[in-house]
Image (cartoon, grey):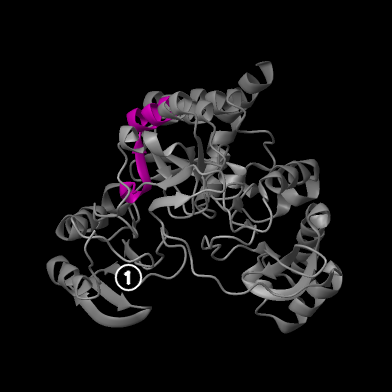
């Protein structure tokens, strides 16, 4: 506990000023990098692989209730954000998170972005369960001091080749593919297939080597060490392939993304539940109750890239007792929204209020699996990960409305923008 207290004391006595100054140029929060927002400080807790044991969820919920605004925001990279933190509450919050085992390395706090399929280990269609790889990779990152120089937004995606789960724009992605010699893991850089891959036992070594390659290439060319930057530079990309030096591997086939809500069958005969969580936000009370249910009904919890949770190994007879919304008819399924004017000084609209009006208007219907609508308070679109069917982007003149990424209406008042969005909503009976 002395180490934990020491970290908290150093944060309070010397690091807060530096952290908040740095945050102005690098708005990517971590446990030791609380950034300022309109409603207080904002912190992000990394949970590699999206694994969320009931005890961890209960601990975060208790800390959010005592030291933040009482909510847990689920992110599109399967992490948790806490906001509304007052400076005086920062030290005890950091101390509590350390005590819960959520800061194994201060230097590597913000680079532990490891997304794994929320269905790993229970998906009857997957080729390989990559849950153990997430833990091995996390340990390898922490053990390598040089990798602390990776950008804070750098992300890994591990895909076992089963149900699609929207890996999005991870810098480095491994996807299982079937070959005559058994499953191999194909490497993609910012979504671009490289045609290279390895067996599962060599995966951690490959990813670490790829990280070092990106850092070296970025230093040589004065570029950010991000996959999306390197793939746009042909010479840099070819250099990356040479440095990685893995064997040939077929690229994975395209797969339809899984539904972001509902009940999915597991290999064991149990079920995985994907409830709809409005704005991806749980209250501390809801999170505590969920942790208690996980213990009582013996299921486990994973974070998903859809800002909700996967409740896994659920006995089907227990589903009615859990009482979670599963049919998408709340209106919030597929809906993402940034904090808006209540939480962000840069927001030009109360996007969450407007998003709630849209959700209420379509409540009682169930969207198709690929429905996605995004409300943004400014052009940065912080809450967006992946493409949306409809984008509403607040401007000084009203909302710009985009359909499938193409501007359809400019500068509409909220009521007209919501009406325009409704025309793109393909309702069906729940």
Q: Which residue appears farthest toward the top when viewing the image?
A: 2
| Quadrant position of residue 381 | bottom left
Q: On the picture, is 297 further left or further right than 9?
A: left
User: Which residue is pictured at 30% across the width and 48% down the height?
Assistant: 278
Q: On the picture, is 57 further left or further right than 230?
A: left
Q: Is residue 285 magenta?
A: yes
Q: Is residue 230 magenta?
A: no
Q: Is residue 38 above or below residue 25?
A: above
Q: Is residue 119 visible?
A: yes
Q: Which residues are magenta?
A: 276-292
User: Which residue is pictured at 75% across the width and 51% down the height?
Assistant: 147
Of 60 and 249, the residue lying toward us: 249
Of 234 and 120, the residue lying toward us: 120
Q: On the picture, is 68 further left or further right than 179?
A: left
Pinpoint residue 64: horizontal percent, then vertical percent: 41, 30
User: Which residue is pictured at 60% across the width and 62% down the height?
Assistant: 170
Number of numbered discs visible in the structure rendering: 1
User: Which residue is pictured at 54% across the width and 54% down the height?
Assistant: 26
Quadrant position of the C terminus in the picture: bottom left
Dominant secondary structure, magenta: helix
Task: Give the SS element for disc 1.
Answer: strand
Q: On the picture, is 368 further left or further right than 225?
A: left
Pinpoint residue 139: horizontal percent, then vertical percent: 75, 41
Pinpoint residue 382: horizontal percent, then vertical percent: 42, 59
According to the picture, the residue beneath numbered tag 1 turns out to be 391
The crowding category of the residue bearing disc 1, from other C-alpha atoms within 10 Å (few below 14, some 14 to 19, many at least 20), is: many
Of 38 and 133, the residue lying toward us: 133
| Quadrant position of residue 109 | top right
Quadrant position of the N terminus in the picture: top right
Of 217 and 307, the residue lying toward us: 307
Q: Is residue 84 visible?
A: no
């Amino acid at each position: 506990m002395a180490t934990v207290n020491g970290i908290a004391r150093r944060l309070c006595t010397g690091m807060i000023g530096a952290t908040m100054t740095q945050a102005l140029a690098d708005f990517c929060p971590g446990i030791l990098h609380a950034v300022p927002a309109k409603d207080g400080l904002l912190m992000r807790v990394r949970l590699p692989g999206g694994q969320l044991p009931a005890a961890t969820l209960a601990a975060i919920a208790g800390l959010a209730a005592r030291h933040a605004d009482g909510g847990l925001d689920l992110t599109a990279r399967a992490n948790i954000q806490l906001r509304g933190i007052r400076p005086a509450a920062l030290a005890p919050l950091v101390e509590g998170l350390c005590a819960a085992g959520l800061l194994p390395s201060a230097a590597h706090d913000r680079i532990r972005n490891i997304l794994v399929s929320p269905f790993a280990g229970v998906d009857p269609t997957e080729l390989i369960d990559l849950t153990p790889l997430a833990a091995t990779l996390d340990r390898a990152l922490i053990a390598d001091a040089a990798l602390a120089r990776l950008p804070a937004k750098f992300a890994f995606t591990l895909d076992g080749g089963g149900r699609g789960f929207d890996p999005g724009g991870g810098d480095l992605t491994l996807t299982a593919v079937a070959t005559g010699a058994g499953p191999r893991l194909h490497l993609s850089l910012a979504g671009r297939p490289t045609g290279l891959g390895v067996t599962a036992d060599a995966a951690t070594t490959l990813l670490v080597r790829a990280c070092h390659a990106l850092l070296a290439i970025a230093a040589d060319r004065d570029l950010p060490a991000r996959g999306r930057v390197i793939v746009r530079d042909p010479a840099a990309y070819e250099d990356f392939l040479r440095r990685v030096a893995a064997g040939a591997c077929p690229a994975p086939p395209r797969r339809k993304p899984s539904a972001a809500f509902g009940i999915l069958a597991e290999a064991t005969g149990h079920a995985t539940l994907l409830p709809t969580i409005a704005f991806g936000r749980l209250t501390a009370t809801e999170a505590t109750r969920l942790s208690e249910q996980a213990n009582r009904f013996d299921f486990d919890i994973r974070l998903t890239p859809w800002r909700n949770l996967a409740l896994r190994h659920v006995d089907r007879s227990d589903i009615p007792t859990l009482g979670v919304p599963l049919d998408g008819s709340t209106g919030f399924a597929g809906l993402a929204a940034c904090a808006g004017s209540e939480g962000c000084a840069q927001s030009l609209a109360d996007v969450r209020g407007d998003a709630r009006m849209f959700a209420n208007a379509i409540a009682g219907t169930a969207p198709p699996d690929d429905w996605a609508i995004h409300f943004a308070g400014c052009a940065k679109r912080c809450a967006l990960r992946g493409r949306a069917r409809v984008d509403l982007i607040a401007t000084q003149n009203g909302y710009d409305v985009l359909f499938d990424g193409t501007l359809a209406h400019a500068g509409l008042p909220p009521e007209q923008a919501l009406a325009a969005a409704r025309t793109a909503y393909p309702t069906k009976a729940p």
